[in-house]
Amino acid sequence: MNRFFKVLFVALIAKPLVLILLGLNVIHREKLPQTGPSIIAVNHNSHLDTLVLLSLYPLSLVHRLRPVAAADYFLSNRIIAWFSLNVIGIIPLTRNGSAKRDLFSDCHKALDNGDILLIYPEGTRGEPEVTSKLKKGIYYLVKDRDDVSIVPVVTHGLGRALPKGEALLVPFNCDVVIGNSLDNKSSPAELVESLTDSYKELLLQCLTYHEHD
């Protein structure tokens, strides 16, 4: 990752895009982790999710935010790979064929470095404003790490602003709600249940949320 490129991108592209084109309601911003090792566990409806989270941090800290992303997608060609690795600063994850100890090795290195990982527990972008079933991988990353906090975050509206498969951004009012750090890491099922319950509670705080969603 090139810190200079990332700061430049966030300052000139991500922050203006989010602040000018999106009406963004941020609730409990003070709960965002400012230091690592930490994990932000956020629902995933749009490529805007990462840009919005980056835009919420001061430029002095954006290099600490490391999105964990699928290697098969973001390293699919040289241009996307260079941008993903050197500008966004992703940690590529090979989703198939890796033992868990190898799968998360780069994530552990980043956490040991005091970074803040951005993880999407659904594993992929779902339908706009629909949270898919959460996967258990996050448990295997943190199960032996008492030093890592997990902060749940829910976004709402970004799936309509830039849905999966679309290239044209449509301005919408959107929400970002940050929850309290989760303590329940005793089993994969219990961690997923705690995270799912947190998402449901945070969704109700979204100003753009309606029951028909």
Image (tube, helix red, strand yellow):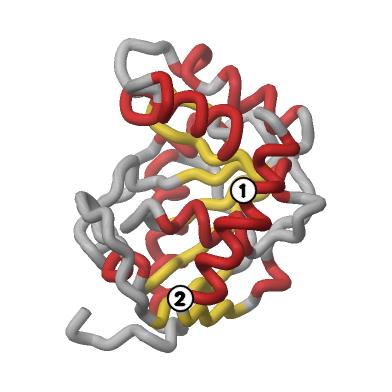
Task: Residue 208 in the image: state x and y as whole percent.
Answer: 37, 85
List the residue tagged with mark 2.
Answer: 22
**Left of 176 or right of it: where is 126?**
left
Q: Quadrant of residue 6?
A: top right
**Rendered view: 116 above or below 179:** above
Asked whether residue 117 is in view, the answer is yes
**Left of 90 or right of it: where is 199?**
left
Of label 1 and label 2, which has the lower sequence position? Answer: 1
Identify the residue at image location x=34%, y=41%: 123
Task: Residue 178 in the image: state x and y as whole percent.
Answer: 57, 69
Crowd around label 1: few <14 · some 14–19 · many ≥20 (10 Å): some
Q: Quadrant of the C terminus?
A: bottom left
Task: Residue 135 in the image: state x and y as whole percent.
Answer: 34, 41
Q: Amino acid at mark 2?
A: Leu
The single residue placed furthest to the front in the displayed view is 12
Q: Quadrant of the N terminus?
A: top right
Q: Secondary structure at mark 1?
A: helix
Asked whether residue 132 is in view, the answer is no
Identify the residue at image location x=30%, y=43%: 124
**Rendered view: 190 above or below 211:** above
Q: Secondary structure at mark 2?
A: loop
- Please state which of residues 86 and 130 is positioned toward the viewer in this rendering: 86
Q: Amino acid at mark 1?
A: Phe
Residues marked 1 and 2 touching at CB (< 8 Å) = no
Crowd around label 2: few <14 · some 14–19 · many ≥20 (10 Å): many
List the residue tagged with mark 1.
Answer: 9
Count of number-bearing discs: 2
Distance in Å between CA atoms under marks 1 and 2? 17 Å
Q: Which of pointers 1 and 2 indicates the residue nearer the eye?
A: 1
